[in-house]
Amino acid sequence: MRYIRVVKDRTARHLMLGIALFSLLLLLVIGITLLFKALPIMREKSLGTLLTSGNWKPFKGDFGFYPFIISTLYVSAIAIIIALPLSLLTSIYLNTYATKGIRKIFEPVIDLLSGIPPVIYGVWGSLAIVPLIAEKISPHFVEFSSGYSVLAGGLVLAIMILPLLVSILTEVFRSIPKEMTDASLAMGATKWQTVKKVILRKSLTGIIAAIVLSVSRAFGETIAVLMVCGNIPLIPKSVFDACYPLPALIANNYGEMMSMPGYESALMLGAFLLFFIILIFNAVSRLTLNQIENRYSL
Amino acid sequence: MMNFGVVRTSSTLEEIQSNSYLRKVESSHTINIKNLNVFIEEHHILKDINLSIPDKSITCIIGPSGCGKSTLLKTLNRMHDETPEVRISGEVIVDEENIYGVNVNVIDIRKKMGLLAQRPCPLPMSIFDNVAYGPRIHGLKRRKAINQTVIQYLQYVGLWDEVRGRVRSSPTRLSIGQQQRLCLARGLAIEPEYILGDEATSALDPISTKKIEELFIKLKEKYSIILVTHTLRQARRIADWVVFMYMGEIIEAGKTEEFFNNPKNKLTREYLSGSFS
C-alpha cells in the first residue's frame, strides 16, 4: 500500500499520454478521411489538372481548383498585410507608452472584439465595406466593381484577426524582462529606439508565431469572407474582382447538388487542400521559427 | 572576417577618451542631493536626503534590504520616470544643474550615468552590437569609429581576448561574469561621467566579483562611482566614502576608514556588528 501513490502517478501518466495521442490521432483521422473521400475525383483526373486548371464547371465535370487556392491565399495575404502593422503598433503602444488607465480600458475591449461572431463581421462587411469599395475606392482604380471583392474579404478578415493579433502580441511584449528595456533606457535610448532595437528584436519569434496563428485562422475563416467576397470561381485579376476562397466553396455547396457525379468528391478534395495548406504553412513556419531561434539564440 | 580598424593590445582610458566621439570629459564632477523625498504611491521611501558625492572616488551606499538604496540610485539617472507611481521632490544637482529642474532632457542625464545593474542583462543582439548600442543610439554612424570604440571598451574590461573570435555571436553563451563585464563595457561606451552600480556583483562568483571590483578601482581615476552594495566587505575593500541608510534616511556617511573603525551612530554600530541586516 506504500506504493499506491506511485501506481497513481503511473496511471495518470499513461492516461494523459493516451489523451495526448488521441488529439494527434484525430488530426490523422480527419486528414485520411478527407483524402479517402477525395480519391474518386483524383482517380478520374490528374492532380496536376485539378490544381492548376481554372475551369470550374461541376455540371460538365470540370473541377479546377486554381481560382479557389489563389483566392484563399490572396484574401489571407491582404488580411495579414493590413492587420500586422496595425496590431504591432497597437500592442507596442499599449505595452510601452500607454498608462495603466488606458490599458485597463483597451484590453477588455480587444477581448470583446475577438468574441464577436464572424457572421456579424460578415453582415457589417457587406453593409459598410462592400459599398465603400464599390462607390468610393474602386472607381479610382478600375472601371467597375460590385464591391464584393478580394479587398472586401481581406479587409473584413483583417478586422477579424486584429484583436487576436493584438492580444497575442501584447502578451509577447509583456514577456520581455523589464531589466532589458530598462538597460536600454538607462543608456539614454528613447522609448522608440528601445522598441525598434530591443523589443521588436527580442520578440521576433513571438511575432512570427502570432502571424502563423492568425494566418491559419484567416485561411479557415468561412462565413464572414463568404458574405463579402462575391463567390465567383474566376481567378481575380485585381483586388477589386470577386473571388471564391476554399472554405466558402465548401460551405456554399456541401449538401447540395450531390447528384452531380464527382462533385462531392471534388468538394472533399477542396477540404483536403485547405487542410493541407494550413498544415504545410504551420510546418514551414515552425521550421523558420527554429532557424531564427538558433541563429539569434534568443 | 571584417576589418576592425586599428587593434591595440591594451588601452587606457586616456587613449580611449582622446578619441572620444561625443565630448571631452569635464574636469570635475560632483553630485549634490538636496532635500530629496521620494514617494511610491503612499509610501515615503526616501526621507529628506542630503548628500554630496565627491568626484573621482567610489562611494558605497550600504544598508539593509528595503532601506531605499536602489531607489536613491535610480533618482540619479531618473529611471523613476518610467514608473508613474513615483513622486519626487527636492533637488539633485549634477554638474551644477538640477536634473529634476524644468527644461532638462532625460536622455542627456542618462547619457551621463553609466548604469551597471544587479544582474547582467545583455540586449538581444551580438556581443559587438551590445557595446555599439550606446554609441549608435547617440548618433555615431561611422563604421570605423564604432569598431574602434567597441574594441577599446572590450579591451578595457578585459573581455576582448576572451571574445575576439565571436564578437558577432550572441552574448548568451558567455559566463555570467563575462556578461557583467560586457554590460560594463556597454555602459562605458556611452561615455558617461558617472558610474552607477546597483549591487553589480551580487549575482557573480568571487573571481568575477574581483575582476569587476578591480575595474571599479581602475575607473575611479576618471569617474565618480556610486555603488549600492549588500556586502560590507566589498564596501571596505573598494569604497572611499560610505553612506549608511536605514528606513529611507541617511544615518551616517563618511570616509571608509573612519566609518568602519569609528562609527558615530548607534544604528551604524549595530549594523556593522551584524545585529540586523
Image (cartoon, rainbow, N blue to C red):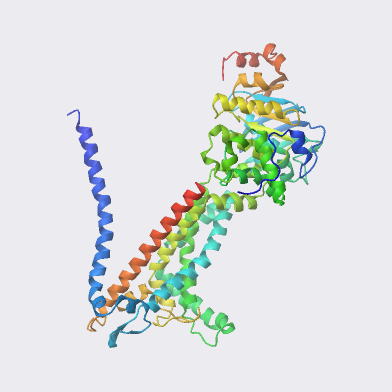
- The structure residue drawn at horizontal position 70% and vertical position 41%, both measured from the top left corner, is B110
B12 left or right, relative to B119: right
Q: Dividing the picture into quarters, in which one does residue B107 lie?
A: top right
A104 left or right, relative to B266: left
Front-most of B153 and A196?
Answer: B153
In this picture, is B16 found above or below A262? above
A126 left or right, relative to B181: left
Q: Dividing the picture into quarters, in which one does residue B154 lie?
A: top right
Q: Dividing the picture into quarters, in which one does residue A53 lie?
A: bottom left
In this picture, is B103 found above or below A28? above
Front-most of A112 and A252?
Answer: A252
Front-most of A78 and B210?
Answer: B210
- The structure residue drawn at horizontal position 69% and vertical position 29%, both measured from the top left corner, is B226
A145 left or right, relative to B256: left
Report how many numbered discs are placed on residues in the image.
0
Percent position of residue B155, x then y: 66, 35
